[in-house]
Amino acid sequence: MMQATKSDLSGLATALRDVVLTVRRRAPGDGPDRGAVMLLVHVLEHGPTRATTLAENVFLDPSTVSRHIRSLEASGLLIRTPDPEDGRATLLKVSTKGRALVTEARKDRIAMLQDAVAHWSEKDVHLLTTLTRRLAEDLERK
């Protein structure tokens, strides 16, 4: 199998960066900031979790996560529940209002992608999805 050249990989890195930055720039800006929404998504996808575990899992400083958690709790998007395994600790759980916000953010992101690839063939969209998933899985393994 032929290896990708340094130039190819540099182009890939630039293209991925450009996609991420464009999606972030075009995402709706009202409501909680994107970092806070990302935390909601993580808790929603991985179930109730401790704040320290959340910070570790999303590779953020605990103080940054703590600030977001306070804001999300104050907005009614995140709630604390007792940890059944340790009565001294609490678990973070996404509220019904938080679930609705994540659902809306996902709809917005899908609509943005749908608009961007509207002129693409179904085959091209499928290929991009397959290769992007493969890249994510290979990066995770390394």
Image (spheres, rainbow, N blue to C red):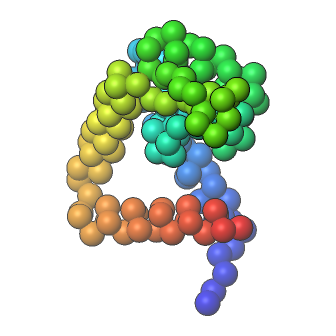
Residue 21 in picture, x, y percent from top left: 54, 37
| Residue 10 in sight | yes
Q: Residue at x 23, y 53 (%)?
A: 119
Specify the quadrant of the image occupied by residue 9: bottom right
Quadrant for residue 84, please give it: top right
Q: Residue at x 65, y 75 (%)?
A: 4
Say if 45 sits above or below 84 in the image: below
Quarter of the image with the C terminus in it: bottom right
Q: Is residue 43 above or below residue 125?
A: above
Residue 36 drawn at (x, y percent): 54, 25
Pick the front one: 124 or 140: 140
Q: Whole-percent x and y of residue 88?
A: 70, 26
Residue at 64% of width from left, 40% of height from top? Answer: 85
In the displayed structure, 38 sits above or below 110; it is above
Whole-percent x, y for residue 47 in the image: 50, 42
Rendered-image quadrant of the N terminus: bottom right
Instruction: Work out whether residue 116 or residue 98 is closer to the camera in this orientation and state it.
Output: 98
Whether residue 22 is visible, yes or no, is no
Drawn side of residue 129 relative to residue 64, left or right: left
Q: Nearer the viewer, residue 119 or 114?
A: 114
Q: Residue at x 67, y 59 (%)?
A: 10
| Residue farthest to the top, as pictured | 74
Foreground pick, 2 / 58: 58
